[in-house]
Image: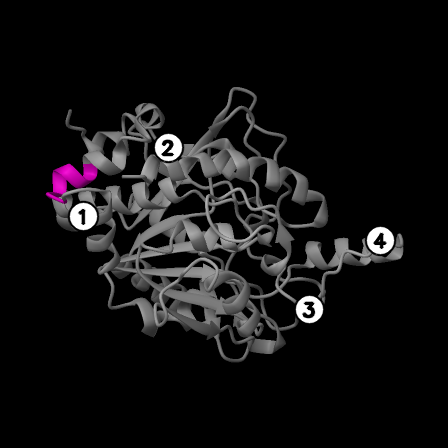
Amino acid sequence: MSIDFDALTTTALSEAFPERRRIPGLAASLAGDADLRALARRLAGATSCITMLAGSGSRWVSSLAEAAAAGEDTGADPTAPRGLFPVQNAMPFGPDPIPIAAYALAAVRDLGRHIVVVRGWEREIEERILAPLAYPVGSWRFATQDAPGGKPRGHGDAAFQTMGEWSGSEYVIVNFGGDASSPLTALSSLAVMDALARSLGDEAPGLLMPAAFVPAPAYPIALDGRGLPTRFGHAKLQGVAPSTGAPSGGYTNVGVRVYRASALRGAIERVRRDHWTAERGYAIPGNAPAPDDTFGGEFALDNVDAMLASEGRARLLCTARPAELSPVKSLADLGRFERDSRIVCGDWAALEG
């Protein structure tokens, strides 16, 4: 059975989830790849994977301080990235427990050259995550995120800082070290982006955003009549609080994003041209700096996504499980993360054979 990936990412969004386990195989067949391993090998040669693993996050550090004040010994170093905190391993390989970020890094292990964005802790990341996950030696590079004005300036700025590492690729996968990432979502999104690039040429999207349908999304994605996203509901970049959720349900994005490298590079260059100066840092409308930050705000990949959506160059692939929406931001998130990771890890079975 063939599949129309153009329709599946526009007018037929709701038809994607029932086909989620078949999509990689259908993409492989369409491209002439012998099997899923051949599909992954071919795509890996054209892809760079950026995994964001720098810093701890203010909510994480605050939750550690609250636990310490209550007399709880979490064993966590507040200066370490939260992605190094150990959790139950629900994957069919690796040690148990395993650091949080192992889920994100396992999901993309076989999909390209790797750039791991860090601010220190390289030895621990290598010894506790990359080596246990059998990452081939030489398949990754650590990139230290600089901090203009004394503070890291967001994932968009990290992508800018590493542009020399990935801009020669055809595709870029970005994922985040605190997410319950699915290997099926990562491979499917990359394979569908590749299929669209080959069939549509210059008309192919610059961004393919995996999305899940949930009953009440706090950050719903607005769609036009053709099924194209017109606005992503990243409320923190709009100066408003999260909504209480669309009561009728809707789509919301998960952690993985797939870009055509040329589109990502072009969007970053425009943001830098229009909203960055060496004297004041970033001044992007909607990205309000913290009260104590005198050097501008952040540059988020959400700004790139919004730009591409406004130009009609973003699409959704609605194959993600709601359980993939389980990022660890604080200690309170760990229980849900472990429960949802057990669900998400069922996706490894879809990639066997």
Q: Which residue is mark 3?
A: 79
Frontmost residue, 297 versus 186: 186
- The percent coordinates of residue 136 (x first, y second) are 35, 65
Q: CA distance from mark 1 to mark 4?
A: 52 Å
Q: Which residue is mark 2?
A: 318
Q: CA distance from mark 2 to mark 1?
A: 18 Å
Above/below status of 138 relative to 185: below
Q: Earlier in the sequence, mark 3 or mark 4?
A: 4
Q: CA distance from mark 3 to mark 2?
A: 36 Å
Horizontal relation, residue 70 to residue 87: left or right? right
For the point 82% across and 54% down, the residue is 66
Q: Which residue is mark 1?
A: 197
- The percent coordinates of residue 284 (x first, y second) are 50, 61
* Residue 219 can be seen in this image: no
Question: Which span is picked out in magenta?
Answer: 27-33
Above/below status of 61 relative to 179: below
For the point 69% across and 55% down, the residue is 60
Q: Tell me, yes or no, whether the highlighted magenta stretch contains residue 31.
A: yes
Q: Which residue is mark 4?
A: 72
Badge 3 crowding class, 10 Å Cα cut-off, few under 14, some 14 to 19, many 20 or more, is few
Image quadrant in which the N terminus is located: top left
Amino acid at circle 1: Ala
